[in-house]
């Protein structure tokens, strides 16, 4: 079983209460009882009883006074019940954790099988080789769509007798609005997806359900859920992260009501913090995940600050 250090969320409430309140209380109670015993023995142990002339019988009279502390027995009986309850809760949580982990790692293994079975049409490329080729195909589709858009603008803005050099300079230096690049990459992904749906559809649906399963299993423990989701991210290649980056912002990442649930989950968990910058065709796309701390951007900021 995975052991997450300092995972306070995994500690049952009864355990925290026992550790923080009950254990110190029992210790103080024990010390006070021992002190009381020796106080009584020291002050009354060798005196004469008020009801008997026998030496030491005062301890018997003190026993009458001690009977008032019979509540201690009930108190310790209650502590025993609490201990049993804590043990039961811990065993239930341990069983739940074990069941979740078994299911989770089985799902991860199945995701790897889906990846290995994916293939590029009309080639022998499978698994990670397919994903590398698929990522290049998506980038090629996007670059083509950008050139087509710039070409249409060139025909409108350049004179009919513009030279090849003028057209080339226009295509190189002309910049589109950020919103246009975002629109183009989403459209490019849709066109790309129609060819690769036989692989990517199954893969991303299964990945979505793994994350959904973890969120549901640890809905009251977001830190624990984040640890498991980090394990998913850690085993994914750069190409998998790149394809997922665009899939989640397309219509295929939305639920039945049209909400970007998948995208918001990935953004919440910083899923793309380690993404290869080569997978980001334009920095205009970073706004798709506003909560994510892209490490390559952090490194760039630090380098600029030192320069």
Image (cartoon, rainbow, N blue to C red):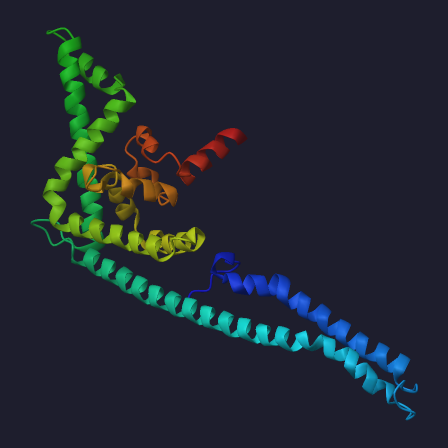
Residue 153's spot in the image, x, y percent? 17, 15
Mark yes or no: residue 164 visible.
Answer: no
Camera-side residue: 220 or 26?
26
Does 47 sit above or below residue 88?
below
Q: How many marks?
A: 0
Residue drawn where x is 42% and y is 51% of the image: 222
The residue at the far front in this view is 51
Residue 167's spot in the image, x, y percent? 17, 15
Does 232 sit above or below residue 79?
above
Does 95 sit above or below residue 117?
below
Quadrant where the N terminus is found in the figure: bottom left
Q: Going by the image, does 68 lie left or right of 117?
A: right
Residue 174's spot in the image, x, y percent? 25, 17
Camera-side residue: 219 or 201?
219
Mark yes or no: residue 173 visible.
Answer: yes
The residue at the far bottom in this view is 54
Q: Going by the image, does 229 lie left or right of 210?
A: right
Does 275 sit above or below residue 101?
above
Residue drawn where x is 24% and y is 59% of the image: 112
Residue 84's spot in the image, x, y percent? 51, 74
Q: Going by the image, does 79 lie left or right of 63?
A: left
Camera-side residue: 59 or 257?
59
Residue drawn where x is 29% and y is 40% of the image: 263
Res 170 → quadrant? top left
């Amino acid at each position: 079983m995975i052991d997450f250090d300092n995972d306070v969320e995994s500690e049952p409430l009864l355990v925290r209460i026992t550790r923080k309140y009950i254990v110190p209380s029992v210790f103080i109670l024990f010390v006070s009882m021992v002190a009381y015993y020796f106080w009584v023995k020291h002050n009354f142990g060798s005196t004469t009883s008020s009801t008997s002339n026998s030496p030491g019988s005062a301890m018997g009279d003190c026993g009458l006074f001690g009977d008032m502390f019979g509540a201690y027995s009930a108190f310790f009986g209650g502590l025993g019940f609490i201990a049993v309850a804590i043990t039961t809760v811990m065993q239930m949580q341990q069983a739940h954790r074990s069941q979740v982990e078994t299911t989770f790692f089985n799902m991860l293994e199945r995701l790897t099988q889906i990846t290995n079975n994916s293939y590029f049409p009309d080639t022998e490329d499978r698994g990670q080789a397919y994903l590398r080729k698929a990522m290049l195909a998506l980038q090629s589709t996007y670059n083509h769509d950008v050139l087509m858009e710039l070409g249409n603008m060139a025909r409108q803005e350049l004179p009919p007798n513009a030279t090849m050099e003028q057209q080339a300079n226009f295509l190189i230096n002309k910049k589109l609005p950020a919103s246009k690049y975002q629109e183009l990459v989403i459209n490019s992904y849709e066109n790309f997806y129609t060819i690769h749906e036989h692989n990517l559809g199954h893969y991303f649906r299964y990945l979505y359900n793994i994350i959904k399963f973890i969120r549901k299993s640890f809905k009251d423990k977001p830190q624990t859920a984040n640890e498991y989701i980090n394990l998913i991210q850690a085993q994914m290649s750069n190409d998998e992260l790149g394809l997922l980056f665009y899939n989640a912002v397309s219509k295929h990442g939305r639920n039945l009501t049209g909400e970007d649930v998948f995208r918001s989950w990935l953004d919440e968990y910083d899923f793309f913090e380690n993404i290869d910058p080569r997978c980001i065709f334009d920095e205009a796309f970073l706004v798709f995940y506003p909560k994510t701390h892209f490490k390559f951007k952090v490194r760039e900021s630090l380098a600029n600050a030192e320069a």
